[in-house]
Amino acid sequence: MSNRQIIQAMSGLMAGMFVAILAGTVVSNALPTIIADLGASQSAYTWVVTAELLAMTATVPLWGKLSDLYNKKLLLQLSLSMFVVGSLLAGFSHGVGLLIFSRVVQGTGAGGLTALAQVVMAAVIPPRRLGKYAGMFGAVFAVGTVAGPLVGGVLVDTSWLGWRWCFFIGVPFALLAIVLLQRTLRLPTVRREVHIDFLGAFLIVAGVCALLIWVSLAGNQFDWASWQTAALTVAGVLLLAAAVVVESRTPEPVIPLDIFRNRTVTLTTVASLLVGVAMFGGTVFLSQYFQISLGKSPTVAGLMSLPMILGLLVSSTVAGQVISRTGKWKVYLVAGAVVMTAGLALLSTIDADTSFGLLSVYMAVLGIGVGMLMQNLVLAAQNDVPAAELGAATSVLSFFRSMGGTIGTSVLGAVLASRVTTEMTKGLKAAGIPTSTQAGSGGGSGVPDIKSLPAPIRTIVEHAYGVATADLFLIATPFALLALVAVVFIKEKPLKTTSGMERLAEEADAAPPAPVG
């Protein structure tokens, strides 16, 4: 494909990715209003968020495998259609049960978009030219991440629109993406006799869901040391162990276990998991820090994350262009891991009195590191696997990054709650204020309304959230350091100059003929 044809095809992919990112971020500022309007509980609040994340993470490997077997364009359009159905169901929901179900449908569609967009890119663009187009996806990621919370806040605050439009707003983009893909993406259909490993797929999804439900709800709905923890972890481990046995024996596994014999795939998978824990686990609580510790509004808090997003945008775009021009990629992985570790370490020094100027520098450093590292891990893996396993390898990396993000967010969220309680108890005692005030100031399960608190308690709450947020970044820093270790051991190999479809044809020609009779 020519550059013009590639850019035309990328327009549909980027519209689809924008939709997936928007779905995850647009409801963040709207959820309190949604839950209050539907008369639902705090438990439902958690499940509206968790349902989409579970469905997206658990189905990524299945979408990746399907892309190795069936027409990738058709699968992309199917995932977008599922997203449209889920969005419409969510927008018309009049009960929390239907809303949670619709988020599962949305998450399944988003899982397809997450896996398939990168697979299709690898199919039509040679690794040597892939870097600069990956930079474009970095830009879409940045815009969707920043625009989501801002758009959600505006829609909720606009009386003639309301929270339902947080779900409806993605529908036109999804329909546009379906049309653009139909008109611009040209992929040959490879017809082959296939047998989907439904048992393996079920065991993987069930095992992953059990573990993700555990890390999502432990510390909130039940204690980390409880019978629920024992039941979910034992069930998850047994289901995944059974999945490994089934996958090792089936001719068409969902996740081909032999791809982990490839050193590059194994190391990039480990690095992706650690990046997910460090980056998502650390940064997801920044908005809460801006609003509670610094006393900013939700809209201003969304704008304050711009330095990190701009750092990510610039570094991913520049690194992608240079990689495409020079063919050298490992130096950007190592540099990205070093800079990301430094950014997390710097953010571990913040408190309630940190100036926004200094905070901006720290966030920009973190964004620059993530921008150089995250997308290029996928490039390194795609460059080193057979074309027939591009979908599986790509989805495995996306899956482990999402899994790391879920685990990091849940565990660090529990750490945050515990640390805030400890700091507030200490602060209230030092000020001579009865600790019974703590429940009303957010030390319990709720999040405090900082503007309604008396000045002495407000100062204590701001300090507690500042110290606790810094601790989260301190805990995330070693995970980034371990990602650096994994990246250092990746062996640099020259980037291939043929696309995935061309490599697939070459591999088919080179394969020995099937025996007769």
Image (cartoon, grey):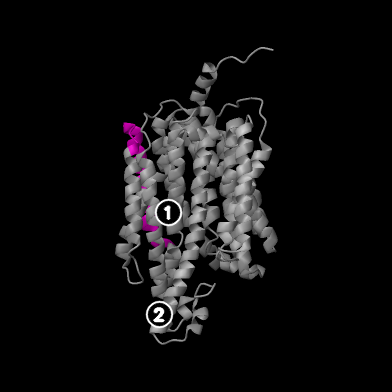
User: Residue 427's mark?
Assistant: 2
Q: Say whether residue 87 is visible.
A: no
Above or below: residue 136 compared with residue 365: above
Q: Which of marks 1 and 2 is nearer the N terminus?
A: 1
Inspect the image, locate mark 1, and give the three-letter code of the amino acid beneath it. Answer: Ala
Q: Where is residue 320 in the image (x, y as percent from the top left)?
A: 37, 39
Name the magenta segment's main secondary structure.
Answer: helix
Q: Which residue is drawn at 48% across and 52% down?
A: 144
Along the line of sight, which residue is nearer the eye, 341 or 245? 245
Residue stretch rendered in magenta on the structure = 302-330
Q: Where is residue 342 in the image (x, y as percent from the top left)?
A: 32, 54
Q: Which mark is residue 278?
A: 1
Res. 402 in view: yes
* SS assignment at label 2: helix
Q: Is residue 131 above or below residue 31?
A: above
Figure disc tally = 2
Residue type indicated by callout 2:
Gly
Q: Residue 417, relative to residue 66: is it above or below?
A: below
Residue drawn at x 54%, y 72% as measured from the top left: 445
- The image quadrant of residue 383 is top left
* Relative horizontal placement of residue 227, taking residue 405 as reference (left or right): right
Q: Distance between the residues labelled 1 and 2?
A: 29 Å
Q: Quadrant of the image for the C terminus?
A: top right
Quadrant position of residue 420: bottom left
Q: Position of residue 130 (x, y in %)?
A: 42, 34
- Give yes or no for contact between labels 1 and 2 (Cβ–Cβ under 8 Å): no
State which quadrant residue 305 falls in. bottom left
Task: Return the x and y of residue 91 as percentages of the image width and height.
Answer: 64, 58
